[in-house]
Image (cartoon, rainbow, N blue to C red):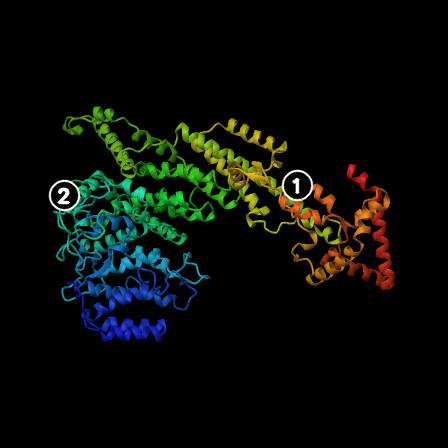
Amino acid sequence: MAAPTLQQPSFLLVNLKADSITKPLLQRCQDLVKIIDEYPAKELRVVFPWLVETVFGSLDGIISGWNLRLLHSRSNEYNVVVEFLNPSGPMMKLVYKLQAEEYKYEIPVNYLPGPVKVCIQEGVLPECPLFHNKLQLPLSGLTLNLALNPFEFFMFHFASCLITPKSYPQDHHGSSTDSAYFVLVDTYLKYFLPCEGSVPPSPFSDSRGSVTAPSPRSSGVSFAGYGVHSPSLLKHHIFHQPSVNADPAAQEIWRSETLLQMFVEIWLHHYSLEMYQKLQSPQVKLALLQYRLSMSSQPFAPPGSGTAHTYQEPFSPTEEHVLVVRLLVKHLHAFSNSLKPETLSSSSPPAHSHTHTSPLEEFKRVVVQRFVQQKLYLFLQHCFGHWPLDASFRAVLETWLSYIQPWRYTEESTTPQPDPNRTVPDKWESFVQENLLMYTKLFQVLLNRAVRTDLVNARNALMVFRVAKVFAQPNLAEMIQKGEQLFLEPEHVLHQRQPRGYLTPSQGGSFLSSRQRVVTDMVFRVKGHVYALEGQDCQYKQMFGCELRGAVMKLIQIIAQARQTAKRISDHSSEVSANNSFLSWFGMGTSELNNTFSGAEPEESGECLKKTHEFLDRALENLCQIFKLNQGQLAQLISNLSSSQDDGNNKQLPDCIQGENGPILTDLGRKQIISGLRRFDIQYQGDPELQPIRSYENALLVRMFYRISSLLNERFGGHMNALCSRPDLLGRLGRHYLSDLDSSARKLKLSPTWRRSSERSRGARLSLRPLASYRTLLLLLLLYGLGAALSLGPVSSTLLLLTGGLLYGLLVALCGDKLKAH
């Protein structure tokens, strides 16, 4: 019975609200355990909605609840919360206690996923049976509500907790897989979708001996989905939920269905307006047209009618969202693969065989294809097209790879050291064919991402390698090719193949007709899968066709260019590290402060670049294996690319056009920079004296020497310019000791801004900044220590240092030109 809209104030609820402000979480949980055990369901029914919102937060995100996504195992409250929300814990006991009394709780339709909300507002019955017979017509004509039982109400809030935007602290991010929410999702999946045994019975029993399942859906109700599956997807005892007197195993299966459908609808059932319109089947459009015609003659229309064209749902899944979806995919594969062999072998059992198969086993047989496939495909397609081109895409990629490799989640795959080159068993051929677009279409979308990604980055290179490694598994490419051949089978050939009557060999038929029937069934199954996900008018592109082969060759060329770029950067890093060796501490290395670039990415370190080279090499090998590319042509392509870059193309700038203030990047130039193929020679072009203070410099000395040198340059600047302009030995000696901006500017391609600002700062000047370096100070300290050991005083040591510096300058001035020529 439904709870009344207007209720008397509950003193229990008032006390709990007061305690939630004053008492700590541990004490509140202890109090709730006692209240759930002692109070009757009549008192607890008012507390339940408030408690659910307190735990999971409000659906509008204003109330954050217990912040399950931020609660980690290192927190003191972690164990208390996980134990309280455990499937056998106090909270679930409260759910079953209220479930036995058949209470209902309302959820506004506005908080449903966008496609479901629009369907209900347009008067069309949603595809998912979870929302059937639960619509509550509004009394005031403002909002529509769904009446859910306690278990559905609890799971709806639990699933919505993941996607509801909340205002978390800035230093907290809910993407960890050890959060309380992630652990609870894993626990609920293992409890209600067990791979071994059956679903545990309810821990609570009322006077009737069991918790009642929801009332079964009327067999007369016909619903039109998006044209993907027919209403009779499962056996009668799965979609039509059983009564109390039914088989106990069948009675408990409704919790497994509810949990899975709620997770799939809340987490995956989101897409854009274009996809929503594309997926609407002719049956849905016809029903919508008839509904509008019938409503046009009536004075009242329900809220939201006629608004399908305004469907907009901003959908930007987070990395945490994707990781939870991957957890769901992995568990569903393990759950489905735990099906008993005798049940798996009878893919199309006779009508009376359902009495010998348990509802849970029947559920395992159809769970992936019927419940998850379509919505996960749309979810992944959206993520592939809208996710940023960075390393965080790894979560989406691994979710996809987990789905297309169900053989990884079998009992055979749990060995400690699985064979990486193990052939994909033939029994998975039907799975590959029934999920053909998951392999081919998403691979093509990934190909478009890869050519726009910086493959010099080791993390991006790893993702390309992971995909190539998965598709290079023996026997997988052949399965995909066979599935494409079945889809491309002409329609008229199917009608000619199809025999008028199927007769078994014992009935006078032939084995050939039986094989033709199997092939025909496979063709219809593949075509039905593609048309269901892409529509009847889809333009299918073959994964092993000429067009995609050209795209793969383009990717291979970009991979080869990225390999060369990584090698060039690695070699340059080795040279720089060699120049900045221990000898540079003594002033004998390169002291080019201008070439110091502190913004280098950690992915450009030598170790990461070696990994990049390794990942890209193995990716090339796997791509050649998948598409059976000619090794000779590939080697020639890489050789030509290497020789062209060795000839000096690696010194080229990104593609630019000359503008008024200098070069302007073109679209090709931007792509070259993003892909790491070309880059500008970034050098500091400002005043060397005003560079940021380095970690190897003393800040106080830098500022003091700058003031001293500025005073000297201001007073003696003219004499310094005159000295440096002389062509004799004194001029060369002055140019060695004094900074000459004119000579340094001629070595660089100056930016327009520097050209304008350098006009007023040219000329020779004295720079004392090298004396503020710690290595210079250490060298002076060692030299003065050596002088003290030789019984030399500070004045004598200073004179010797100045004399040595002068002789070194004379040597450079006399022999500098000869050394440069050599």
Alpha-carbon span between mark 2 and mark 1: 84 Å
Q: Give the answer, above or below, for where 777 lies relative to 404.
A: below
Residue 136: percent from the left, percent from the top? Answer: 18, 57
Q: Residue tagged by mark 2?
A: 352
| Residue bearing mark 1 | 749
In the depicted structure, whether residue 544 falls above or below residue 294: above
Residue type (three-letter) at the residue carrying disc 1 = Lys
Image-quadrant location for residue 705: bottom right
Earlier sequence position, callout 2 versus callout 1: 2
**At label 2, which amino acid type do we have?**
His
Q: Which is closer to the viewer, label 2 or label 1?
A: 1
Label 1 packing within 10 angstroms: few (<14), some (14-19), many (20+): few
Q: Position of residue 278 (x, y in %)?
A: 28, 39
Q: Quadrant of the C terminus?
A: top right
Is 728 on the left-hand or right-hand side of 609? Answer: right
Disc 2 + disc 1, Cβ < 8 Å: no
- Which is more toward the observer, 630 or 49? 49
Element marked by disc 1: loop
User: Quick one: SS at disc 2?
Assistant: helix
Question: In the rendering, at what x and y percent does residue 180 appear?
Answer: 37, 61
Closer to us: 155 or 625: 155
Percent x, y for residue 318?
Answer: 40, 52
